[in-house]
Amino acid sequence: MTAFNVAQKILLANAAGGLKQLPEPGQPLEIQFTHTLYQDATGTAAALAFEKMGVDRVKTTSVIVVDHKTLQVGYIDGDDHRYLETFSKKYGCWFSRGGLGICHSVFLEDFAAPGKSVIGSDSHTTNAGGMGMLALGAGGTDVSFAMAGTSYKISMPNVVQVNLTGALHPGVLAKDVILNVLKVIGIKGNKDICLEYTGPGLKSLNVTDRATICNMGTEAGVAFSIFPSDDITKAYLEGRKRAGDFKPLAADAGASYSRTVEINLSDLQPTIALYPRLKGMEPVSKHAGMPIDAVFIGSCTNSNYENLARVGELLRGKKVKVDTAIAPGSQAIARQLAAAGYLEIFYAAGVRVMENACSACIGQGFSPPSNGVMLSTANRNFEGRSGTETAAVHLVSPVTAAASAVTGVLTDPRDLLADNPDLVIKLVPPVVDMDAYVKPLPPAEAAKVVMRYGPDIAPLPTLDPLPAKLAGEVMLKLGNEITTDHIQPAGKYLSLRSNADEYAKQATFVQVDKTFSARAAAVRDAGGHGFIVAGDGYGMGSSREHAGLCPRILGIRAIIAKGFERIHLANLANFGILGLTFENPADLERIQQGAKVSLDTSGLESGQLKLVVEGVGDMPLKLAQGKEDIPMIRAGGALSLFASQMKAA
Ligand code: MIC
Ligand code: SF4
């Protein structure tokens, strides 16, 4: 009998059509997801897509969470939230109103279950891997198809084992573990692997620690990360009054892996990921004394009770020296902190306690001052993401952030543990309140719900098919590691998510080149096609499908890069944009912004294409997307293909 690892077991258990044998790595595999997750920033576009699918009721346990756009300056976000609430009621979803928490935190607390699977329209849906769940981020359109009952294609990953030995010292947290894993495996080019955590070190990590580690696997660009489900998982579920959801999940003796990474937890130190784009993971002690202007402790990464209680222990009886904000991951966590007396400690220390939401992680409030330095416990520090283009945001653990808030400079938290050397926290029971959600309505009641839109919720545009010949201009030439925050920034533009035309006009590549959207639209309006050329790691970061949709609205039909990240490449296909790589990566040097180019798309199926660059010559290209994506790209995108199939049926 074959010995299976946990990743293989969970993939088989959730494969469509009762598959008995997994394909070889790199081969397609269809997954039938049991759960789906939307948040409010990607959710409206995804819900609009779902509404076009003509399905009466969701086929998965579907959870919709308001967490990103909670500042609500004006009516737009309120309209989106009301739309999502009526959508939830009409189609049978669970709805979590603003303030109840961050989607990944509430999903872990009340919905994630070992052995099951979730696909969510947010890249950090991987968080639920900490519960022994197959958890993937994807574009909203893909999530909507999964909600409608369609299987979702992944490429069978190579399973990399991360073997944990030793135990963490006080003052060293799960955040430090994942920063050190990222240091070993790098932050790009990992889309063909998943990470499976094993070893004796597992027993020192609780479910929320494990979730932190899986959450930031996304920063490496891995398909997903997973932990086994064991007694620690069982105890967590019992605490959440969900003992019935427990299912053990362990690797078989003798299970094999494509590669093993060894991490000795006892060797780890508090770590900092330097700005920007997690450039350099280094010991905090190496940079100790660095002056800081602000501290943000929050985000889906690690704003759980255990971490924030440690922050409380560090802040007990002290005052912060710099502007400091704490945003608990969920209302349940905030209530638990209150019951244990930690909320009082935060206020007494001079901390600003923020809403239980994404908040400063995505530039929704608490932006640092100009040229400022902020320490943040979030998972990303892309340029401009904080809302302040000139500020540097370094990523650290909650206790490093708290210790630094107290001293006003970057501080190793172990220097401040004299009062509580083991960082012992007060344990109070978790808060479970399922009545806080708007629950799925029975079908008869759901049928009566009237959908409510708002003046700025624009229908999704109809996208035209791919022409047999593309001819136009290179609208932008870019370097390596272009993130989705470069392509389609969030922050102050977040309210435009439900109006893709306006979002494209105002925000696409605005931090890279303010002239881009007007130039691209002019070429489009003159009947030309837009191209973008770039280096490696194109589309890192978020699952936001607007980073595909908005360039497409502006006439971009092909992106030629040295390499793409997984979710973004799928989003490009969903909106009919060709993702191509250079056969000779050095060709990027030979092509300039403004070059006149053409591309014959009739032979897409061969996977080999040729870019003709006026005055330079031909460049061989390869299709980066799968052959099975071609009909969708030819049709103009996923919804265009779906509409044509419906017509034909
Ligand atoms: C992020 O952390 O970048 C976001 C905002 O949560 C995104 C989703 C979005 O852009 O709405 C993500 O991670 O996918
Ligand atoms: Fe929200 Fe930040 Fe988590 Fe994204 S990474 S879901 S913005 S808290």
Image: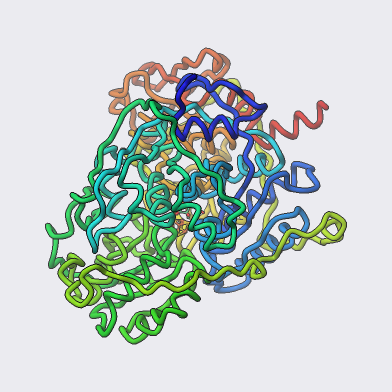
> Seen in the image, is 279 located left or right of residue 498?
left
The structure residue drawn at horizontal position 56% and vertical position 37%, both measured from the top left corner, is 526
Query: Horizontal placement of 633 versus 263: left or right?
Result: right
Front residue of 369/188: it is 188
Image quadrant assignment for residue 149:
top right
Choose between 195 and 562: the one closer to the eye: 195
Percent coordinates x, y for residue 566 in the rendering: 46, 35
The vertical placement of 1 against 124, above or below, is above
Q: Which residue appears at 64% of the width and 43% of the height?
A: 34
Compared with 458, 318 (above or below) is: below
Q: Quadrant of residue 263?
A: top left
Residue 323, x across and y down, in percent: 30, 77
Work out whether residue 335 or residue 637 is closer to the camera in this orientation and state it. Answer: 335
Task: State whether residue 521 appears in this view.
Answer: no
For residue 641, above or below residue 308: above
The structure residue drawn at horizontal position 28% and vertical position 63%, both measured from the top left corner, is 391
Q: Position of residue 530 (x, y in %)?
A: 49, 35
Left/right placement of residue 404 relative to residue 175 reads: left
Give the number of marks.
0
